[in-house]
Image: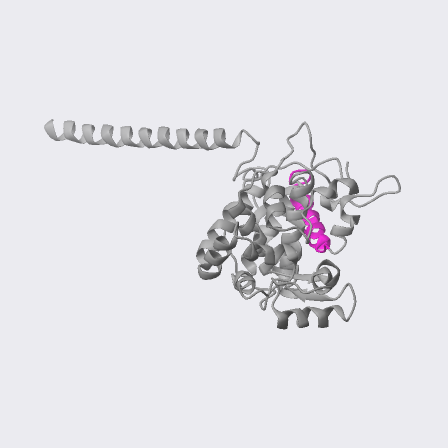
Protein backbone atom coordinates (compact mmCIF):
# COMPACT_ATOMS: atom_id res chain seq x y z
CA UNK A 1 0.00 0.00 0.00
CA UNK A 2 2.81 2.40 0.85
CA UNK A 3 4.49 1.62 -2.46
CA UNK A 4 1.27 2.35 -4.38
CA UNK A 5 0.89 5.60 -2.43
CA UNK A 6 4.42 6.71 -3.35
CA UNK A 7 3.73 5.80 -6.98
CA UNK A 8 0.50 7.83 -6.89
CA UNK A 9 2.30 10.86 -5.44
CA UNK A 10 5.00 10.57 -8.08
CA UNK A 11 2.42 10.48 -10.90
CA UNK A 12 0.52 13.37 -9.32
CA UNK A 13 3.72 15.42 -9.09
CA UNK A 14 4.53 14.69 -12.76
CA UNK A 15 1.03 15.72 -13.85
CA UNK A 16 1.21 18.92 -11.82
CA UNK A 17 4.61 19.81 -13.31
CA UNK A 18 3.29 19.14 -16.82
CA UNK A 19 0.25 21.34 -16.18
CA UNK A 20 2.48 24.06 -14.76
CA UNK A 21 4.67 23.90 -17.85
CA UNK A 22 1.61 24.20 -20.09
CA UNK A 23 0.42 27.24 -18.11
CA UNK A 24 3.86 28.88 -18.45
CA UNK A 25 3.91 28.21 -22.20
CA UNK A 26 0.39 29.63 -22.63
CA UNK A 27 1.38 32.75 -20.70
CA UNK A 28 4.48 33.13 -22.90
CA UNK A 29 2.42 32.75 -26.08
CA UNK A 30 -0.16 35.24 -24.81
CA UNK A 31 2.56 37.68 -23.82
CA UNK A 32 4.21 37.28 -27.20
CA UNK A 33 0.90 37.90 -28.93
CA UNK A 34 0.25 40.93 -26.76
CA UNK A 35 3.66 42.41 -27.63
CA UNK A 36 2.82 42.17 -31.31
CA UNK A 37 -0.75 43.47 -31.15
CA UNK A 38 0.34 47.12 -31.27
CA UNK A 39 1.23 46.82 -34.97
CA UNK A 40 -0.46 43.53 -35.80
CA UNK A 41 2.81 41.78 -36.65
CA UNK A 42 3.98 38.39 -35.40
CA UNK A 43 7.05 36.23 -35.97
CA UNK A 44 4.72 33.28 -36.65
CA UNK A 45 2.06 35.15 -38.61
CA UNK A 46 1.96 32.63 -41.48
CA UNK A 47 2.60 29.46 -39.48
CA UNK A 48 -0.93 28.16 -40.12
CA UNK A 49 -2.04 30.07 -43.23
CA UNK A 50 1.12 29.60 -45.34
CA UNK A 51 3.59 27.38 -43.49
CA UNK A 52 6.18 27.16 -46.28
CA UNK A 53 6.49 30.90 -46.90
CA UNK A 54 10.00 31.13 -45.42
CA UNK A 55 11.64 28.35 -47.49
CA UNK A 56 9.93 29.60 -50.65
CA UNK A 57 11.37 33.10 -50.18
CA UNK A 58 14.82 31.80 -49.17
CA UNK A 59 15.11 29.37 -52.08
CA UNK A 60 14.11 31.89 -54.74
CA UNK A 61 16.37 34.62 -53.31
CA UNK A 62 19.27 32.18 -53.03
CA UNK A 63 18.80 31.05 -56.63
CA UNK A 64 18.61 34.64 -57.86
CA UNK A 65 21.80 35.64 -56.01
CA UNK A 66 23.66 32.62 -57.37
CA UNK A 67 22.80 33.83 -60.88
CA UNK A 68 23.49 37.50 -60.08
CA UNK A 69 25.21 38.34 -56.75
CA UNK A 70 24.59 42.07 -57.30
CA UNK A 71 20.90 41.49 -56.56
CA UNK A 72 21.67 41.37 -52.83
CA UNK A 73 22.30 45.11 -52.85
CA UNK A 74 19.28 45.68 -55.09
CA UNK A 75 16.80 43.87 -52.81
CA UNK A 76 18.14 45.51 -49.67
CA UNK A 77 17.99 48.97 -51.26
CA UNK A 78 14.45 48.35 -52.53
CA UNK A 79 13.27 47.49 -49.02
CA UNK A 80 14.84 50.65 -47.61
CA UNK A 81 13.26 52.82 -50.32
CA UNK A 82 9.91 51.18 -49.66
CA UNK A 83 9.95 51.76 -45.90
CA UNK A 84 11.20 55.35 -45.99
CA UNK A 85 8.47 56.66 -48.27
CA UNK A 86 5.04 55.54 -47.01
CA UNK A 87 6.19 52.89 -44.56
CA UNK A 88 6.91 49.22 -45.29
CA UNK A 89 3.85 48.62 -47.45
CA UNK A 90 5.17 47.43 -50.82
CA UNK A 91 4.29 50.75 -52.49
CA UNK A 92 7.68 50.78 -54.25
CA UNK A 93 6.54 47.74 -56.27
CA UNK A 94 3.53 49.44 -57.88
CA UNK A 95 3.77 50.20 -61.60
CA UNK A 96 2.80 53.61 -62.95
CA UNK A 97 -0.42 53.97 -64.94
CA UNK A 98 -1.70 56.60 -67.36
CA UNK A 99 -3.41 58.30 -64.39
CA UNK A 100 -0.63 57.97 -61.81
CA UNK A 101 3.17 58.17 -61.73
CA UNK A 102 4.28 55.74 -59.05
CA UNK A 103 7.21 55.85 -56.62
CA UNK A 104 9.41 53.56 -58.70
CA UNK A 105 9.54 56.15 -61.50
CA UNK A 106 10.99 58.85 -59.26
CA UNK A 107 14.54 59.88 -60.29
CA UNK A 108 15.87 58.50 -57.00
CA UNK A 109 14.29 55.10 -57.71
CA UNK A 110 14.98 54.60 -61.41
CA UNK A 111 18.09 52.52 -60.68
CA UNK A 112 16.19 50.09 -58.42
CA UNK A 113 16.07 46.49 -59.66
CA UNK A 114 15.07 43.06 -58.51
CA UNK A 115 11.34 43.46 -59.11
CA UNK A 116 11.31 40.18 -61.05
CA UNK A 117 12.59 38.33 -57.97
CA UNK A 118 9.67 39.65 -55.91
CA UNK A 119 7.28 38.72 -58.75
CA UNK A 120 8.62 35.15 -58.84
CA UNK A 121 8.20 34.75 -55.08
CA UNK A 122 4.68 36.17 -55.20
CA UNK A 123 3.64 33.88 -58.05
CA UNK A 124 4.85 30.79 -56.19
CA UNK A 125 3.15 31.83 -52.95
CA UNK A 126 -0.10 32.55 -54.79
CA UNK A 127 0.01 28.97 -56.07
CA UNK A 128 0.58 27.58 -52.58
CA UNK A 129 -1.61 29.90 -50.49
CA UNK A 130 -3.61 32.36 -52.62
CA UNK A 131 -4.34 35.80 -51.20
CA UNK A 132 -2.41 35.25 -47.97
CA UNK A 133 1.14 36.66 -48.10
CA UNK A 134 1.52 40.39 -48.71
CA UNK A 135 4.03 41.89 -51.12
CA UNK A 136 5.30 44.10 -48.27
CA UNK A 137 6.21 40.99 -46.26
CA UNK A 138 7.78 39.32 -49.29
CA UNK A 139 10.04 42.34 -49.84
CA UNK A 140 11.03 42.49 -46.15
CA UNK A 141 11.87 38.77 -46.10
CA UNK A 142 13.74 38.94 -49.41
CA UNK A 143 15.92 41.80 -48.15
CA UNK A 144 16.66 39.88 -44.95
CA UNK A 145 17.63 36.75 -46.88
CA UNK A 146 19.73 38.77 -49.34
CA UNK A 147 21.78 40.09 -46.40
CA UNK A 148 22.30 36.55 -45.10
CA UNK A 149 23.30 35.03 -48.45
CA UNK A 150 25.77 37.89 -48.98
CA UNK A 151 27.52 36.91 -45.75
CA UNK A 152 25.71 39.20 -43.32
CA UNK A 153 23.94 38.56 -40.03
CA UNK A 154 21.03 36.17 -39.55
CA UNK A 155 17.95 37.83 -38.10
CA UNK A 156 14.24 37.17 -37.88
CA UNK A 157 11.48 39.66 -38.64
CA UNK A 158 7.84 39.84 -37.57
CA UNK A 159 5.33 39.48 -40.38
CA UNK A 160 1.77 40.49 -41.13
CA UNK A 161 2.25 43.76 -43.03
CA UNK A 162 -0.48 44.70 -45.45
CA UNK A 163 0.11 46.24 -48.86
CA UNK A 164 -0.52 49.96 -49.24
CA UNK A 165 -3.03 51.43 -51.67
CA UNK A 166 -1.01 54.52 -52.57
CA UNK A 167 2.16 54.96 -54.64
CA UNK A 168 2.89 58.48 -55.88
CA UNK A 169 6.08 60.00 -57.18
CA UNK A 170 5.73 63.12 -55.01
CA UNK A 171 6.03 61.05 -51.83
CA UNK A 172 9.63 60.12 -52.64
CA UNK A 173 10.75 63.54 -51.39
CA UNK A 174 11.05 61.76 -48.03
CA UNK A 175 14.11 59.80 -49.20
CA UNK A 176 17.52 61.00 -47.92
CA UNK A 177 19.63 62.61 -50.64
CA UNK A 178 23.18 61.44 -51.49
CA UNK A 179 24.37 65.01 -50.89
CA UNK A 180 23.16 65.11 -47.26
CA UNK A 181 25.66 65.87 -44.51
CA UNK A 182 25.64 64.12 -41.14
CA UNK A 183 23.30 66.65 -39.49
CA UNK A 184 20.79 66.33 -42.31
CA UNK A 185 20.98 62.54 -42.18
CA UNK A 186 20.49 62.50 -38.41
CA UNK A 187 17.44 64.74 -38.78
CA UNK A 188 15.96 62.69 -41.64
CA UNK A 189 16.34 59.41 -39.77
CA UNK A 190 15.15 60.92 -36.48
CA UNK A 191 11.86 61.77 -38.21
CA UNK A 192 11.46 58.02 -38.66
CA UNK A 193 12.38 57.31 -35.06
CA UNK A 194 16.04 56.33 -35.50
CA UNK A 195 19.04 57.38 -33.42
CA UNK A 196 22.31 58.60 -34.95
CA UNK A 197 23.86 55.19 -34.25
CA UNK A 198 21.00 53.36 -35.97
CA UNK A 199 21.36 55.70 -38.93
CA UNK A 200 25.07 54.85 -39.26
CA UNK A 201 24.32 51.13 -38.91
CA UNK A 202 21.70 51.28 -41.67
CA UNK A 203 24.10 53.28 -43.85
CA UNK A 204 26.33 50.23 -43.59
CA UNK A 205 24.02 48.64 -46.16
CA UNK A 206 26.36 50.38 -48.60
CA UNK A 207 28.76 47.56 -47.92
CA UNK A 208 26.80 46.10 -50.86
CA UNK A 209 26.36 47.62 -54.27
CA UNK A 210 27.37 50.61 -56.34
CA UNK A 211 26.61 54.29 -56.85
CA UNK A 212 26.15 55.98 -60.20
CA UNK A 213 28.35 58.90 -61.19
CA UNK A 214 25.38 61.28 -61.22
CA UNK A 215 25.07 60.88 -57.45
CA UNK A 216 28.69 61.74 -56.58
CA UNK A 217 30.11 63.87 -59.42
CA UNK A 218 29.36 67.00 -57.37
CA UNK A 219 32.34 66.05 -55.18
CA UNK A 220 34.69 66.29 -58.15
CA UNK A 221 33.96 69.85 -59.25
CA UNK A 222 36.17 71.34 -56.55
CA UNK A 223 38.69 70.18 -53.98
CA UNK A 224 36.90 68.11 -51.33
CA UNK A 225 39.00 67.95 -48.15
CA UNK A 226 37.08 64.86 -46.99
CA UNK A 227 38.02 62.94 -50.16
CA UNK A 228 41.36 61.14 -50.57
CA UNK A 229 43.18 62.61 -53.59
CA UNK A 230 43.95 59.23 -55.15
CA UNK A 231 40.40 58.04 -54.68
CA UNK A 232 39.19 61.29 -56.27
CA UNK A 233 41.08 60.22 -59.41
CA UNK A 234 39.32 56.85 -59.30
CA UNK A 235 35.93 58.54 -59.10
CA UNK A 236 36.87 60.91 -61.94
CA UNK A 237 37.90 57.96 -64.07
CA UNK A 238 34.55 56.28 -63.40
CA UNK A 239 32.65 59.43 -64.36
CA UNK A 240 34.54 59.70 -67.65
CA UNK A 241 32.14 57.03 -68.89
CA UNK A 242 29.07 59.15 -68.13
CA UNK A 243 26.46 59.76 -65.45
CA UNK A 244 25.29 56.15 -65.37
CA UNK A 245 28.79 54.73 -64.81
CA UNK A 246 28.96 52.70 -61.61
CA UNK A 247 31.42 52.88 -58.72
CA UNK A 248 31.38 50.17 -56.00
CA UNK A 249 30.91 51.53 -52.47
CA UNK A 250 33.82 49.40 -51.28
CA UNK A 251 36.28 46.76 -52.51
CA UNK A 252 33.88 43.87 -51.74
CA UNK A 253 30.70 45.04 -53.45
CA UNK A 254 28.86 41.70 -53.19
CA UNK A 255 29.99 40.78 -49.66
CA UNK A 256 28.22 41.98 -46.54
CA UNK A 257 31.06 43.01 -44.21
CA UNK A 258 32.53 46.11 -42.53
CA UNK A 259 34.90 47.02 -45.38
CA UNK A 260 32.63 50.00 -46.15
CA UNK A 261 33.45 51.59 -42.79
CA UNK A 262 37.16 51.01 -43.25
CA UNK A 263 36.87 52.81 -46.58
CA UNK A 264 35.33 55.81 -44.83
CA UNK A 265 38.26 55.93 -42.39
CA UNK A 266 40.61 56.11 -45.42
CA UNK A 267 38.49 58.93 -46.93
CA UNK A 268 37.33 56.56 -49.67
CA UNK A 269 33.61 57.11 -49.23
CA UNK A 270 31.82 57.39 -52.57
CA UNK A 271 28.86 59.65 -51.75
CA UNK A 272 28.85 62.83 -49.70
CA UNK A 273 26.34 61.06 -47.43
CA UNK A 274 28.88 58.24 -46.96
CA UNK A 275 32.02 60.22 -46.17
CA UNK A 276 30.22 62.69 -43.94
CA UNK A 277 29.70 59.88 -41.43
CA UNK A 278 33.44 59.90 -40.76
CA UNK A 279 34.06 63.59 -41.41
CA UNK A 280 31.52 64.68 -38.81
CA UNK A 281 32.37 64.49 -35.09
CA UNK A 282 28.70 63.61 -34.55
CA UNK A 283 29.17 60.14 -36.05
CA UNK A 284 32.93 59.55 -36.43
CA UNK A 285 33.25 57.42 -33.30
CA UNK A 286 30.48 55.10 -34.51
CA UNK A 287 32.24 54.62 -37.85
CA UNK A 288 35.51 53.88 -36.05
CA UNK A 289 33.76 51.31 -33.86
CA UNK A 290 32.19 49.50 -36.81
CA UNK A 291 35.46 49.61 -38.78
CA UNK A 292 37.20 47.93 -35.86
CA UNK A 293 34.44 45.53 -34.79
CA UNK A 294 32.43 43.81 -37.52
CA UNK A 295 30.38 41.81 -34.99
CA UNK A 296 29.22 45.05 -33.38
CA UNK A 297 28.15 46.39 -36.79
CA UNK A 298 26.29 43.16 -37.60
CA UNK A 299 24.41 43.25 -34.30
CA UNK A 300 23.42 46.92 -34.58
CA UNK A 301 22.49 46.50 -38.25
CA UNK A 302 20.11 43.62 -37.64
CA UNK A 303 18.47 45.48 -34.75
CA UNK A 304 18.02 48.57 -36.91
CA UNK A 305 16.66 46.52 -39.83
CA UNK A 306 14.00 44.92 -37.65
CA UNK A 307 13.04 48.39 -36.41
CA UNK A 308 12.96 49.78 -39.96
CA UNK A 309 10.61 47.00 -40.96
CA UNK A 310 8.06 48.33 -38.46
CA UNK A 311 7.78 51.82 -39.97
CA UNK A 312 4.14 52.75 -40.60
CA UNK A 313 2.93 49.21 -41.23
CA UNK A 314 -0.61 48.98 -42.61
CA UNK A 315 -3.33 46.94 -40.93
CA UNK A 316 -6.45 45.40 -42.48
CA UNK A 317 -8.29 48.74 -42.49
CA UNK A 318 -5.56 50.62 -44.33
CA UNK A 319 -4.08 47.92 -46.53
CA UNK A 320 -4.68 44.80 -48.55
CA UNK A 321 -2.96 41.68 -49.84
CA UNK A 322 -2.32 42.22 -53.54
CA UNK A 323 -2.63 39.35 -55.98
CA UNK A 324 -0.07 41.05 -58.19
CA UNK A 325 2.63 43.11 -56.46
CA UNK A 326 2.65 45.64 -59.31
CA UNK A 327 -1.04 46.53 -59.13
CA UNK A 328 -3.36 47.82 -56.42
CA UNK A 329 -6.51 45.69 -56.11
Horizontally, residue 306 falls left or right of residue 68, namely left
The magenta segment: 112-133
Report if residue 56 is visible in the image: no
Our reading of the magenta stretch's main secondary structure is: helix
Q: Quadrant of residue 17?
A: top left
- Image position of 45 with respect to 300: above or below: above
Task: Give residue 47's position: percent from left, percent from top.
Answer: 54, 40
Residue 115 versus residue 262: which sits nearer the camera? 262
Q: Nearer the viewer, residue 201 or 69?
A: 201
Residue at position x 78%, y 40% in the image: 170
Q: Which residue sits at x=55%, y=57%?
A: 278
Does the magenta run of residues contain 119?
yes
Say if residue 189 shows up in the picture.
yes
Residue drawn where x is 58% and y is 53% of the image: 203
Q: Position of residue 171 (x, y in %)?
A: 74, 40
**Residue 52 or residue 36, whichever sits in front:** 36
Amino acid sequence: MMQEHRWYLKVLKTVMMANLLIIVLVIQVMASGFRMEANGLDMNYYVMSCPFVEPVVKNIVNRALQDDPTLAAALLRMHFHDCFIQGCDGSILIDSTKDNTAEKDSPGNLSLRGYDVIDEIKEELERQCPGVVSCADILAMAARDAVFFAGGPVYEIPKGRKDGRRSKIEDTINLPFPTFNASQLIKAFAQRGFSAQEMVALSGAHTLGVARCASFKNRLNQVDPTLDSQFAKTLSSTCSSGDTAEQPFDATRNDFDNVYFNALVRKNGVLTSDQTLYASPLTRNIVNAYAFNQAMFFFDFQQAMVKMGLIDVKDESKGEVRQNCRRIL
